[in-house]
């Protein structure tokens, strides 16, 4: 039976043998289909085509595999060839390194031998020198260094003096440049103000209306504002007197509004004063905010802004406090930039250094009041120290405190910044010295720093230590009683010095 007969033989019915099912179950026997000759021929032809295509595909795959094998073998051969070349190069390098190592070892051995010989010769020469000079090596070294130091001592001293002189000149020059530049940077458009709260009147009739029937209007004004109204001093004006400049300003504005309105009576007075207080408080807050923003502070608490705004109506010897604070803060910031200090600490220290001057409901110097306020509000300790030390009441604790002190002194001491009657100023200083000299055992007394410090020199054989302490306390009490107008606080220092002098003949 041929190949095709094996494939397609199953399609032909068997004539002699019957299947098992046909023999046993004849009723299930199915008739076998007889394929026509043409269909059988087509199937055989298709089978031959399939077999031919399969053989061609097998040959193609075989050729591709052989080609891939040849290419792989060629690549492997090339890689083996390159590896062999690299191995040869590495072997040559290893050989050269071995030769170099041997050469270096030989040179090192030669060098060690020469060093041993040199050290031996050195020791022999040193021994010979020691025997010749009668000195040990350490003694000779010490003598040589002493001789060299003596020769160079004068030269070293001269160079040190020259360096110190140059450094001092440069430091003085640089300091002057920094201060001048800082003052120029801190210059403001403000000038010193000399303020007396007065209200001009058009005629005498208005003064009578302000006084009112049986003085009811003037009493209502004084009770509402807390300010004294002086109406008898001059005929065409009314002077306002109060220790609180904000109250005085409220009274001045309220009186001007009442005069303009014309309805001057107790009920209207209370209404106008209340409205004026709100307006002034708004102005104060705006001025405080403007001051903070002018120096680069934007997160200040509202209560501090309101206090700083009160500087608008506060003067120190004719110098407006807002003008002084703005000028001092700009100077301090510039100095801090120049010397590399903490600019933010200096900025806040300068801005808040005089905040105690507008606290009127407590007793104490403006320094102590300012320090207490800032400490209660959780300000940084460095800023509090700047405020506490800006009048040298305490020793300086940082460079920032020194800068705040310098900036305050520059702003307050420049020509035209402040105004004070010269005769009154001299009188106050003379009074301070006379108070101190009135005590027994005092040799002399000197007022310093515009009357902020009083130094008392006493006789050591008359005044002992305990008496000196009591004397300083008594002098301060007497100053508080007799001197009514003085800036800040006065520091009294009693100096008791014992000197023993002998003369040798």
Image (tube, grey):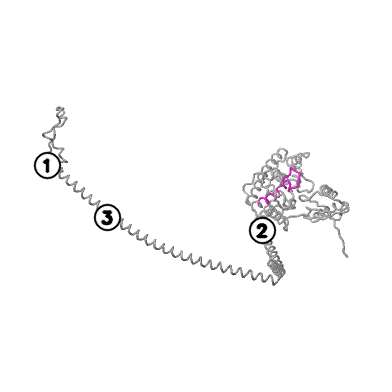
User: Are the residues at dot 3 and dot 1 in contact (C-beta closer than 8 Å)?
Assistant: no
**In this rendering, which labeled residue sits more in front, label 3 or label 1?**
3
Would you say 114 lies left or right of 312 here?
left
Can see residue 371?
Answer: yes
Per the picture, the main secondary structure of the magenta-coloured stretch is: helix
The crowd level at tag 3 (other Cα within 10 Å; few <14, some 14-19, many 20+) is: few
Residue named by callout 1: 38
Give the residue furthest to the bottom: 132
Query: In percent of the image, x 13 and y 32: which residue is there?
Result: 18
The magenta span reads 347-369
Query: In percent of the image, x 71 and y 39: which residue is there?
Result: 270
Of pointers 3 and 1, the one earlier in the residue sequence: 1
Residue named by callout 2: 182
> Residue 14 appears in which quarter of the rendering?
top left
Of pointers 1 and 2, the one earlier in the residue sequence: 1
Label 3 vs label 1: CA separation? 44 Å
Query: In the rendered view, would you say 345 is above or below 2?
Result: below
Residue named by callout 3: 67
Task: Point out residue 134 in the picture as x, y percentages from the top left corner.
Answer: 71, 70
Task: Point out residue 73 in the picture as x, y percentages from the top left corner.
Answer: 30, 56
Magenta residue check for 85: no
Most foreground residue, 472 or 214: 472
Q: Which mark is residue 5?
A: none
> Residue 262 appears in which quarter of the rendering?
top right
Secondary structure state at the residue bearing disc 2? helix
Most foreground residue, 81 or 329: 81
**In this rendering, which labeled residue sits more in front, label 1 or label 2?**
1
Can see residue 158?
Answer: no
């Amino acid at each position: 039976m041929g190949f095709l007969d094996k494939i397609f033989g199953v399609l032909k019915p068997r004539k002699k043998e019957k299947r098992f099912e046909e023999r046993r179950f004849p009723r299930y026997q199915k008739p076998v289909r007889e394929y026509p000759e043409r269909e059988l021929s087509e199937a055989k032809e298709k089978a031959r085509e399939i077999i031919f295509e399969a053989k061609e595909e097998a040959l193609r795959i075989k050729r591709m595999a052989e080609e891939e094998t040849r290419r792989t073998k060629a690549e492997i051969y090339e890689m083996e060839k390159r590896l062999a070349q690299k191995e040869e190069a590495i072997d040559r390098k290893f050989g050269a390194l071995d030769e170099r190592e041997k050469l270096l070892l030989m040179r090192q051995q030669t060098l060690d031998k020469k060093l041993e010989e040199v050290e031996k010769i050195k020791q022999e020469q040193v021994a010979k020198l020691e025997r010749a000079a009668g000195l040990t090596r350490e003694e000779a070294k010490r003598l040589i260094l002493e001789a060299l130091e003596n020769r160079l001592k004068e030269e070293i001293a001269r160079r040190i003096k020259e360096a110190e002189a140059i450094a001092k000149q440069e430091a003085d020059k640089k300091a002057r440049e920094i201060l001048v530049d800082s003052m120029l940077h801190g210059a403001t458009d403000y000038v010193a103000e000399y303020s007396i709260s007065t209200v001009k009147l058009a005629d005498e009739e208005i003064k009578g209306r302000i006084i009112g029937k049986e003085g009811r209007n003037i009493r209502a004004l004084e009770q509402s504002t807390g300010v004294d109204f002086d109406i008898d001093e001059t005929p065409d004006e009314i002077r306002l007197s109060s220790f609180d400049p904000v109250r005085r300003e409220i009274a001045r504005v309220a009186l001007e509004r009442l005069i303009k309105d014309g309805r001057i009576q107790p009920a209207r007075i209370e209404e106008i004063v209340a409205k004026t207080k709100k307006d002034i408080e708004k102005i104060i807050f705006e001025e405080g905010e403007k001051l903070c923003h002018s120096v680069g502070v934007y997160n200040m608490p509202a209560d501090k802004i309101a206090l700083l705004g009160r500087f608008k109506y506060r003067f120190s010897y004719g110098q407006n406090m807002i003008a002084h604070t703005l000028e001092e803060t700009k100077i301090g910031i510039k100095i801090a930039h120049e010397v590399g200090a903490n600019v933010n600490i200096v900025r806040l220290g300068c801005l808040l250094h005089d905040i105690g001057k507008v606290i009127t409901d407590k007793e104490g110097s403006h320094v102590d009041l300012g320090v207490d306020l800032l400490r209660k509000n959780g300000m940084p300790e460095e800023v509090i120290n700047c405020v506490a030390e800006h009048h040298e009441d305490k020793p300086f604790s940082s460079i920032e405190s020194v800068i705040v002190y310098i900036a305050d002194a520059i702003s307050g001491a420049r020509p035209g910044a402040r105004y004070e009657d010269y005769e009154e100023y001299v009188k106050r200083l003379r009074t301070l010295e006379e108070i101190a000299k009135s005590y027994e055992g005092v040799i002399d007394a000197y007022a310093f720093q515009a009357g902020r410090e009083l130094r008392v020199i006493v006789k050591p054989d008359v005044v002992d230590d305990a008496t000196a302490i009591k004397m300083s306390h008594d002098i301060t009490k007497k100053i508080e009683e007799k001197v009514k107008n003085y800036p800040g606080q006065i520091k009294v220092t009693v100096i008791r010095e014992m000197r023993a002098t002998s003369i040798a003949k």
